[in-house]
Amino acid sequence: MVFGFLPKKLLLPEIDKTKMETNKTFTMIKPDAVASQHIGAILNKITQAGFKIVALKYTSLSPELAGKFYAVHAERPFYKDLCSFMSSGPIVAAILEKDDAVASFRKLIGATNPAQAEEGTIRKEFAESIEKNAVHGSDSDENAQIEGNFFFSAFEKF
Ligand code: ATP
Ligand code: MG
């Protein structure tokens, strides 16, 4: 292992998956939905579905930060366009709380491609295309924690 020579305390702490919270997820209202004035309607759908807002921020991503956030897709053909879209205007970032938050929120937002999203989902109602699809939702408890920490300090979570 490359960092085998480093003392253990100098390495980043590993996330203990046995202690992972299952009641939190992370979302972004993407630049398309912010530009179309859908922040209020989307937050309303989220709270009506029983999610509590634990942290909330109106901000924007530089191309570099968008690249970091979506680094998992770096090899995909849509990565460059995705990074320029995600840095094209303001976004709203939020940490949400509910039982089984990740799966429950993925159900609420619907399929990545709005053409395949179920009736009543956020993407069905507000997404323009497979890229400009209105909202992000974390895909695992581990990523929810990583993504929440990407945007919020401990003092910004309630
Ligand atoms: P997100 O991670 O934003 O919640 P997702 O998990 O439904 O979306 P991913 O496969 O993680 O979908 O893709 C990340 C984002 O990349 C999508 O939400 C979309 O904005 C964009 N994207 C995905 N597939 C395509 C594609 N085929 N063409 C263009 N953009 C795409
Ligand atoms: Mg994803």
Image: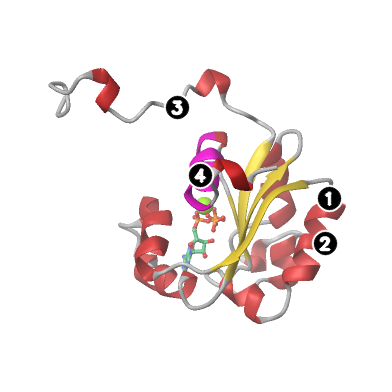
Q: Which residue is mark 2?
A: 44
The circle on residue 49 is: 1
Name the residue rendered at 39%, 61% in the picture: 65
State the predominant SS element of the stretch in magenta: helix
**Looking at this view, is 113 or 80 the one in front?**
80
Residue 72 position (above or below residue 117): above
Q: Quadrant of residue 2?
A: top left
Badge 3 marks a residue whose secondary structure is loop
In x, y percent, where is residue 34?
65, 75
In x, y percent, where is residue 96?
70, 46
Q: Which residues are magenta?
A: 142-151
**Looking at this view, is 108 or 16 the one in front?**
16
Mark 2 or 1 closer to N-term?
Answer: 2
Q: Which residue is mark 4?
A: 149
Q: Which residue is mark 3?
A: 15
Instruction: Locate residue 121 relative to residue 129 in the image: left or right.
Output: right
Q: CA distance from mark 1 to mark 4?
A: 24 Å
Name the residue rendered at 55%, 46% in the picture: 148
- Tell me which amino acid carries mark 4: Asn
